Image (cartoon, rainbow, N blue to C red):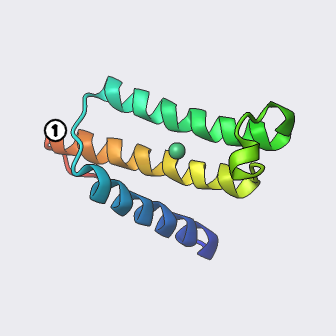
Amino acid sequence: MGEATAAVLAEVGAERQRQDARWGQQDHAPEVWLMVLAEEVGEANQAAFEHLFPRFDKHAAQRGPRSLADYRRELVQVAAVAVAAIESLDRQSGSAPS
Ligand SMILES: [Mg+2]
């Protein structure tokens, strides 16, 4: 594993810890996890869109313009939710990662 990959995965791990601290262990059905994941993908999409097209950003006046750092932060959340969904599936199916 390269250094860049390890650094990003560490960020995803830290985001997983934040999620657990905020929400506790979550054991949803697969379709619910997919909705949560889609919501996070939507936030990443919105951050990228508002960065590229700031005239459509309704909240820029309050919080400032969106940056690619906002998009990146949302992508880390997407990855962390995907990890949480895998963890949940493994717990519910009793299967250990192979
Ligand atoms: Mg998000």
- Between 98 and 37, the one nearer to me in the picture: 37
Left or right of 32? Residue 80 is right
Q: Looking at the image, is 30 positioned above or below residue 25?
A: above
Which residue extends farthest front? Answer: 62
Instruction: Say which quarter of the image contains residue 48.
Output: top right
Residue at the image point whose x is 23% and y is 44% from the top? 90
Left or right of 77? Residue 21 is left
Q: Looking at the image, is 66 positioned above or below residue 49?
A: below
Kind of element beneath mark 1: helix
Left or right of 54? Residue 74 is left
Q: Amino acid at mark 1?
A: Gln
Instruction: Say which quarter of the image contains residue 86.
Output: top left
Residue identifier under label 1: 92
**Residue 37 spot, x, y in % from top left:** 46, 35
- The quadrant of the rendering that contains the N terminus is bottom right
**Residue 53 spot, x, y in % from top left:** 85, 36
- Between 84 and 6, the one nearer to me in the picture: 84
- Between 64 and 89, the one nearer to me in the picture: 64
Give neighbour class at mark 1: few <14, some 14-19, many 20+ (Cα, 10 Å): few
Residue at the image point whose x is 60% and y is 76% from the top? 3
Count of numbered circles in the view: 1
Which residue extends farthest bottom? Answer: 3
**Is residue 82 at least partly visible in the picture?**
yes
Residue at the image point whose x is 17% and y is 45% from the top? 91
**Residue 31 spot, x, y in % from top left:** 34, 23
**Is residue 1 at least partly visible in the picture?**
no
